[in-house]
Image (spheres, grey):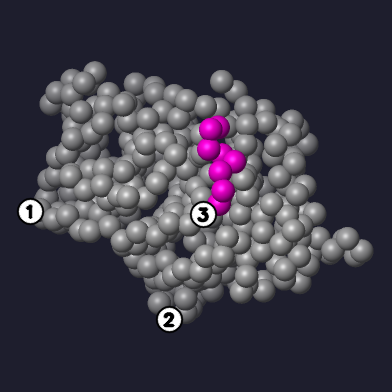
Amino acid sequence: MGPVTNPERNPQVLDCTSGGRATVELITPRDVPLGGPRAMTVRRTLPSRSRSLIGAWCFLDHYGPDDVAETGGMKVAPHPHIGLQTVSWLFTGEIEHRDSAGNHAIVRPGEVNLMTGGRGISHSEISSDDHPVLRGAQLWTALPDSARDTEPRFDHYVPPEITGEGWAVRVFLGSLLGSTSPVETFTPLLGAELLLEAGATLSFALDPAFEHGVLVDTGGVAVRVDGGILPSGGEATMVVKDVLAYTAPGAMTMTVQANESTRLLLLGGPPFGESIVMWWNFIGRTHEEIVEARDAWQAAITDASSGAVVPDSQLVSASQFGTVLGDHLPPIPAPPLPNLRLRSRR
């Protein structure tokens, strides 16, 4: 979806190292304008200054409710990715996806769309004017070193709804409450949407090897984790709208209690265990990899005689990023690299 291109005017350069600190954190979002006729804004919680990853989850934009007629919606032209998977999850609205692997799909609420960038892919995403309110989340997962040069691909899955007293859950990645997603990931991951009525309580088992994140879309929820290295019966942490709560590995059980009608995303995975360099739409391991990917994209979209960006994406076909067929918006140029060497830290 639209936010996947991370087009901040001055995108942060992040040296990212994952690790399981024995803490619980509340991560407050920062507003990032995505551009468009009236500059739609998203709320970004990953990466943040306090935490770069939760498992392999390395990027989380949360947006809406957005009035498409007012903001112009999302019109994200072809742009590149390497070394990651994008995960699109809508609450309301509809978005058209096209990519250079030949995939054309409509992103709808309750249906996960996962695009593997691998060695290189480009894609575009355009919101539908037929659905006036856009709301959802755009996430990335970092590919481990063993898989980051894999072939690009696209997966679509409609998870069944699991229900109980006052709650409903859809598991789009990994396993929870007896439901398992068939979508392939390259590290163990958990991704689920939880809906709770006011006053409802839901407890569920966790993988103690995982760290977890709870993002509240609407309402508010009290979160408590117990067992393993953590004391039983500990105090709950209140998590309000738009905030991401992080819990460290070691918990055996999580309990969430809604103080009002609440929708949230639950994310998880074992600490990633690798340092990454994340800049613009690229995830690599070294400064040289990022520079090489940026140069390859710029060469693919630039007319050699004039130095101008090509009028459509057709000239991208010979590069590692391919051509987004059926999309004739000018591709997005990469921003200038910062005047420093990008380094990963362990």
Above or below, 105 against 281 in this view is below
Question: Magenta part of the protein: which range?
Answer: 145-152
Asked whether residue 51 is in view, the answer is yes
Q: Whole-Å distance between the Cαs marked 1 and 3?
A: 38 Å
Nearest to the observer: residue 141 or residue 41: 141
Q: Which label belongs to residue 165?
A: 1
Q: Badge 3 is on which residue?
A: 153
Distance Cα–Cα, label 2 vs label 1? 34 Å
Determine whether the residue tagged by mark 1 lies in a helix, strand or loop: loop
Q: In which quarter of the image is the C terminus?
A: top right
User: In the image, which disc is placed on residue 130?
Assistant: 2
Look at the numbered disc 3 and give the secondary structure of its residue: strand
Is 334 covered by the magenta stretch? no
- Amino acid bearing label 1: Glu
**Badge 3: how crowded within 10 Å, few (<14), some, or many (20+)?**
some
Q: Residue at 44% x, 70% y: name it.
A: 106
Residue occupying the point 61% across, 74% down = 326
Residue 24 can be seen in this image: no
The label shown at residue 6 is none
Q: Relative to 84, does residue 212 appear above or below in the rendering?
A: above
The amino acid type of the residue labelled 2 equals Asp
Q: Is mark 2 on a helix, strand or loop?
A: loop
Identify which amino acid the numbered label 3 is placed on: Arg
Q: Residue furthest right?
A: 305
Q: Is residue 288 left or right of residue 168?
A: right
Residue 71: x and y in percent read: 52, 72
Determine whether 200 is above or below 97 in the image: above
Query: Of label 3 and label 2, which has the lower sequence position?
Result: 2
Task: Determine the residue located farthest toward the bottom in the rendered image.
Answer: 130
- Give residue 150's quadrant in the image: top right
Q: Which residue reaches farthest left?
A: 165
The residue at the point 39 percent across, 23 percent down is 20
